[in-house]
Amino acid sequence: MTHPLVDQLRFTRSEWLRALDGVSDAEARRRFEPMNCISWMIGHLATQENAYWVLWGQGKELWPDLNKLVGFGSPPSTPPLEEMWAAWQDITHAADTFLESLTPEGLLTHLERNGQSRPESIGTMLYRNIYHYWYHLGEARAVRQLLGHTNLPEFVGDLGIKAPYRPGHQR
């Protein structure tokens, strides 16, 4: 069975998709400084999932140049929306392979790569990933408001249906 925290990440991703539905390439590339543009945010969140769940979790790296374009600390850019969605889709699909394997015990461990160990447990990394999405969800909503979009979706959507509380593994 999928761990409840993984269900929460998947729900968060679905809210991300819902929040950005209908945004055009031109709108996604518009930047209201000091915020980044929406297409940057999409690629940026993909870089985190790529680093955590694909590179560190599985030893594979998808879209190796993405981090230079939209990674933490990279200079502002306005990448094409279609390209950022393609990267996000590829990476989240690959990440799910790792995420499906997580157990309650595994969430307490630390990922290792090339003799280095991540400082946070996998469970803490999963929380960080979820909260990172919500940060950018609010930021993307602000950008959409600045673009003049109205009737934006209310959040948090169908949490009680798509990802209700359920207890984790009982010891």
Image: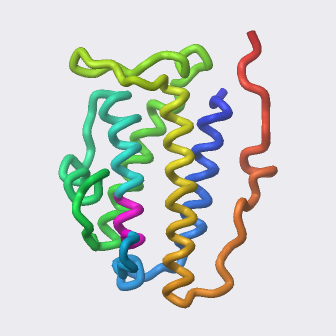
Quick one: which residue is furthest to the bottom in this view?
148
Q: Give the residue displayed 59% in from the left and 46% down from the top.
A: 10
Residue 96 drawn above or below residue 71:
above
**Quick check: is 149 in the magenta stretch?**
no
Magenta portion: prevailing SS class: helix
Question: From what the image shows, is residue 134 above or below residue 139?
Answer: above
* Residue 38 belongs to the span the image colors magenta: yes
The quadrant in which residue 51 appears is: top left
Q: x, y (%) of residue 96? A: 48, 38
Furthest residue to the front? 34
Check the picture and name the quadrant holding the N terminus.
Answer: top right
Q: Give the range drawn in magenta.
A: 36-43
Residue 87 position within the rendered picture, expressed as x and y whole percent measured from the top left: 33, 56
Percent from the top left, x then y, of residue 133? 52, 53
x 55%, y 45%: residue: 130
* 3 displayed left or right of 63: right
Left-right relation of 164 to 116: right
- Quadrant assignment for the C terminus: top right
* Front in this rendered view, residue 56 or 30: 30
Residue at image coords 79%, 38%: 165
User: In the displayed structure, does residue 1 sit left or right of residue 57?
Assistant: right
Residue at image position (64%, 40%) is 7
Q: How is the image coloured?
A: rainbow
